[in-house]
Amino acid sequence: FTGDASPYAGGDPYADHRTADFPFTHLVDLADRRLGAGVIAANDEFFAERENLLKPEPAVFDPEHFGHKGKIMDGWETRRRR
C-alpha cells in the first residue's frame, strides 16, 4: 500500500486513506475477448450471458433496455438460491 496509513487523521475513523498499488495491474489480461478468450461453459445464464465475463469495459445499467429474455444485463452474476 502507498499513502497515509493512519485512518484516524480526523474524520471517519473507519476510512482507509491508503491506495493499493497492485503489481498485477500491469500484466496482460488473458481473459480478454480481444485476445481471443472465450467462455467454454456456464451452469446458469439466468441473469445475463456468460460472454459478459470477458467484456473489457465496465458494466452499464440501463433500466429501459429489454430483450426477448427480459431485462438486459451487461454484467454477469449467478442466480441466488434460498
Image: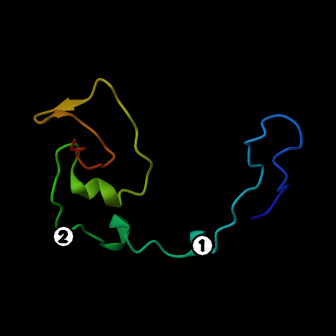
Q: Residues within 10 Å of mark 1 (few under 14, many from 20)?
A: few
Q: Quadrant of the N terminus?
A: bottom right
Q: Earlier in the sequence, mark 1 or mark 2?
A: 1
Please state the horizontal and vertical placement of residue 17, each as a whole percent of the image: 78, 49
Label 1 and label 2: CA atoms lie apart by 26 Å
Three-letter code, disc 2? Ile
Say which of 42 and 70 sits in front. Answer: 42
For residue 43, the mark is: none
| Disc 1 + disc 2, Cβ < 8 Å | no
Q: Amino acid at mark 1?
A: His
Q: Nearer the viewer, residue 13 or 22?
A: 13
- The quarter of the picture where residue 73 lies is top left
The image shows residue 47 at horizontal and vertical percentages of: 22, 42
Colour mode?
Answer: rainbow
Q: Could you tell me residue 3's position as x and y percent?
A: 83, 58
SS at mark 2? loop
Q: Position of residue 35 (x, y in %)?
A: 36, 72
What secondary structure is marked by label 1?
helix
Residue occupying image coordinates x 30% and y 49%? 76
Q: Residue drawn at (32%, 58%), measured in percent from left and top?
A: 53
> What residue appears at the point 73 percent right and 56 percent down from the top-left corner?
19
8 displayed left or right of 30: right
Residue extending farthest to the front is: 82
Disc 2: which residue: 40
Position of residue 2 in the picture relative to residue 76 (left or right): right
Q: Residue furthest left?
A: 68
Q: Which of 36 and 54 lies nearest the eye of the viewer?
A: 54
Residue pointed to by mark 1: 26
Nearer the observer: mark 1 or 2; the answer is 2
- Side of 58 where 6 appears, left or right: right
Tell me the crowding category of disc 2: few under 14, some 14 to 19, or many 20 or more residues within 10 angstroms, Cα based: few
